[in-house]
Amino acid sequence: MKVTLAIACVFLGCCSNVIFLELLVKEDPGSGNLITFAQFLLISLEGFIFTSKFGTVKPRIGFKDYMIMVFMFFLASVCNNYAFDFNIPMPLHMIFRAGSLIANMIMGIIILNKKYPLSKYLSVLMITMGIVMCTIVSGQEIKSTQKMATGASPPSPMENLFWWSLGITLLTVALFISARMGLYQEVLYVKYGKHPKEALYYTHLLPLPFFLTLAPNIWDHAILAVNSDPTSVLGITLPKTVAYLIGNVLSQYMCIASVFVLTTECTSLTVTLVVTLRKFVSLIFSILYFRNEFSLYHWIGTSLVFSGTIIFTEVIPKLRESLSPRADDKKVK
């Protein structure tokens, strides 16, 4: 029952989080830093109360080790956020981030001298082809995500292309920083043991001072949020963007907390399968509900990305293995 509830909360929390994020980005494309700060603040408060017990529980991993991981985490988050401000549509953003396996493999080969079977290289090739196809097609349909001031002339196609290219660059940088952070996290877990709840708390608490460098940007978009059109939520009148922000932060917490329950209660196979399916459902919903442009080539590219992910994680053979009767059971019969 606990696992079933956690899986349901992953789909509800993570998928609704994507919905609120897209609503926020449509209202204010530059609100990424405000969104991330609010998420970090809530998770830090929850961790301070329930994980560190108001600062009475000492961390098992050293602060120096955490700071290195936190610096990478902060950079990746900021790069992903700013990408929305540079003509990157939500579906492409989601597809691009689904390609984290490519970066993980490349960094693993370079840093840890890892070797992989042929199926892994094939799957990564499929993912790469899918992302490249979606990126090229999206590049031919660039539209500015910025709201134009009254009387201002629209940006030229070359200007749109420049900002879109910068957005793609930011997504690529974030992808490789996240992959490097994952490898560093593996090293810390080998050295200190696995403490995911503690890691979740400190990776959200320690970056908070870094947001001081983004304070003017966060403040400007907070003012925009407060001054947005009013809407009624459960009989309470709130600025529309503030309501979306609250929904995004709460759903993000539900998503992360549910994934944490799955990592402690289920095998990595189950977690990978649930997260992969969740990403696919979020993508389909984004396309259909928000009517984002999605051509046949987008569908082919998306199929390559998710098929490659399933091959890489060996979901199908492992499911067959888990569902087939064991040798010991056959002998008993």
Image (cartoon, rainbow, N blue to C red):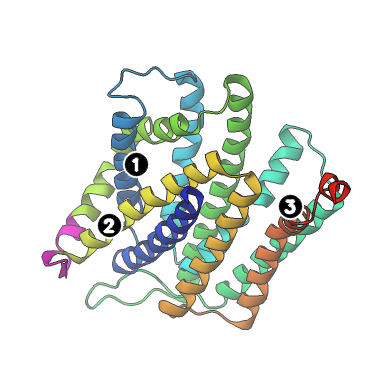
Look at the image and give the residue range highlighted in magenta: 223-237
Above or below, 264 against 240 in this view is above
Q: Earlier in the sequence, mark 2 or mark 1?
A: 1
In the rendered structure, does residue 224 fall within the stretch colored magenta?
yes
Q: Which mark is residue 322?
A: 3
Label 3's element?
Answer: helix
In the rendered structure, does residue 216 fall within the stretch colored magenta?
no
Tell how many labels. 3
Left or right of residue 259, residue 211 in this image: left
The residue shown at (29%, 58%) is 247
Q: Which mark is residue 66?
A: none
- Please name the amino acid that badge 2 sits on: Leu
Cα separation between marks 1 and 3: 38 Å
Q: Nearer the viewer, residue 274 or 126?
A: 274
Left or right of residue 87, residue 242 in this image: left
Cα separation between marks 2 and 3: 41 Å
Q: Position of residue 201 (x, y in %)?
A: 40, 33
Residue where numbered disc 2 is placed: 245
Residue where numbered disc 1 is placed: 40
Above or below, 57 against 167 in this view is above
